[in-house]
Image: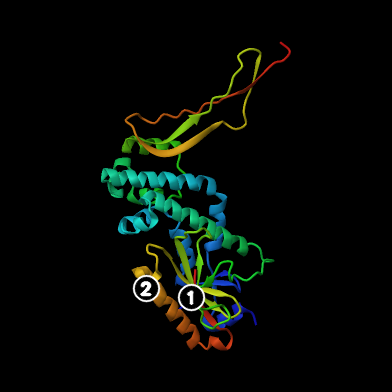
């Protein structure tokens, strides 16, 4: 008799936990979930500093408290539009896009499109009065043409 | 009356909370929920001195440790060929003067093998090496019994062990209490 059978004799039919199913789903989404968690923590901290409840924040955002509650759990796949609005309402910068500098040889250069945009996103609230503006910059790699 | 849910069949089980929820899933859920964690540390400002961090940073610590712990368990769950015992890999005896050969051993597993671990899961060990998780806590004090959640957890563990004993499971298993 297996352990499971023995336990079923005591507990009756044993259902399976949904844990593994959820764990697999979150593992597949780990990259953006990690960022969502960071962002949610920043917002929670800003709300505390401002003395705003989640209800107040929801009202300012024009959404229901249930929506805000979901955001702040750290599992929301935010759109840039929503992040931008949050930044505007809270008057903070939450993310910034760092543009990498590539050495560009302006002489005899050949420009290629990149498969991946060479920017990274930092998440961290900054006190700022400026409105968030998206700055996705397409940077091309270059190399010198040796046959000048 | 206790009910349980299967985490890894024949190896790991958890007390059921409601129809679709159990204590293992609850820990997995709460320990990655930023809103829950921020409120947790807001309600326990004294705990931040234990972490030597602010609320945001303490929450990030918990998230990171929990992610690693549940990743380890998921890896076991997804590899049916891995039949290595959970003893010493996930769980350890709670008291230094006890070991897994003893009946009704209280044991503990850490959220991480790093020098300082902030998460604990508590379970009852069955003689054949299977475990029934009774719950988990985020540490806020050095000793389990120094916080209310710890005291409640020890009580649940004792009740679970007693329940299993009353069901005459000791004929089939020995029960050890595992504190993770």
Where residue A41 sits in the image (x, y, percent)? Answer: 39, 47
Q: Chain of mark 1?
A: B
Look at 62% across and 28% down and name the residue there: A114
Residue at the front extreme? B97
Q: Is residue A112 above or below residue B158?
A: above
Return the x and y of residue B177 as percentages of the image width and height: 49, 77
Quadrant (top left, top right, bottom left, bottom right) of the C terminus of chain A: top right
- Kind of element beneath mark 2: helix
Residue appearing at x 48%, y 88% in the figure: B166
Query: Could you give the CA–CA distance between mark 2 and mark 1, rounded to whole angstroms?
Result: 16 Å
**Residue receiving disc 2:** B151
Residue pictured at 59% horizontal, 76% vertical: B129
In front here: A106 or A17? A106
In the foreground, B17 or A140: A140
Name the one closer to the observer, B23 or B175.
Answer: B175
Asked where in the image residue A42 lies, by quadrant, the reply is top left
User: Does residue A85 appear left or right of residue B72 in this picture?
Assistant: left
Q: What residue is shown with label 1?
A: B95
In the rendering, at what x and y percent does residue B25 appear? Answer: 48, 64
Q: Position of residue A66 (x, y in %)?
A: 36, 51
Using a 10 Å C-alpha cutoff, classify the residue at mark 2 as few (fewer than 14 neighbours), some (14 to 19) or many (20 or more): few
């Amino acid at each position: 008799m297996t352990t499971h059978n023995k336990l079923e004799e005591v507990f009756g039919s044993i259902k399976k936990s949904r844990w593994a199913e959820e764990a697999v789903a979150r593992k597949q989404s780990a990259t953006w979930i990690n960022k969502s968690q960071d962002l949610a923590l920043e917002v929670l901290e800003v709300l505390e500093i401002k003395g705003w409840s989640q209800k107040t924040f929801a009202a300012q955002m024009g959404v229901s408290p249930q929506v805000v509650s979901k955001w702040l759990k750290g599992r929301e796949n935010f759109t840039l539009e929503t992040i931008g609005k949050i930044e505007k309402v809270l008057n903070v910068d939450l993310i910034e896009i760092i543009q990498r500098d590539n050495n560009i040889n302006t002489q005899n250069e050949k420009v290629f499109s990149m498969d991946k945009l060479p920017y990274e996103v930092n998440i961290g609230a900054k006190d700022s009065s400026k409105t968030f503006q998206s700055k996705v910059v397409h940077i091309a790699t270059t190399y010198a043409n040796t046959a000048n | 009356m206790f009910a349980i849910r299967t985490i890894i069949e024949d190896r790991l089980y958890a007390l059921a909370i409601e129809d679709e929820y159990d204590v293992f899933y609850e820990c997995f859920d709460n320990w990655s929920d930023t809103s829950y964690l921020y409120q947790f540390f807001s309600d326990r400002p004294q705990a931040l001195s234990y972490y030597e961090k602010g609320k945001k940073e303490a929450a990030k610590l918990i998230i990171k440790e929990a992610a690693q712990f549940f990743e380890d368990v998921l890896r076991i769950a997804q590899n049916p060929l891995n039949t290595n015992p959970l003893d010493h890999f996930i769980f350890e005896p709670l008291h230094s003067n006890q070991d897994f050969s003893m009946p009704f051993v209280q044991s503990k597993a850490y959220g991480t093998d790093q020098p300082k671990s902030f998460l604990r899961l508590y379970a009852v060990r069955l003689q054949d090496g299977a475990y029934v998780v009774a719950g988990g806590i985020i540490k806020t004090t050095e000793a389990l019994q120094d916080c209310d959640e710890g005291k409640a957890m020890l009580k649940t563990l004792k009740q679970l062990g007693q329940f299993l004993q009353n069901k005459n499971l000791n004929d089939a298993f020995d029960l050890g209490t595992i504190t993770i």
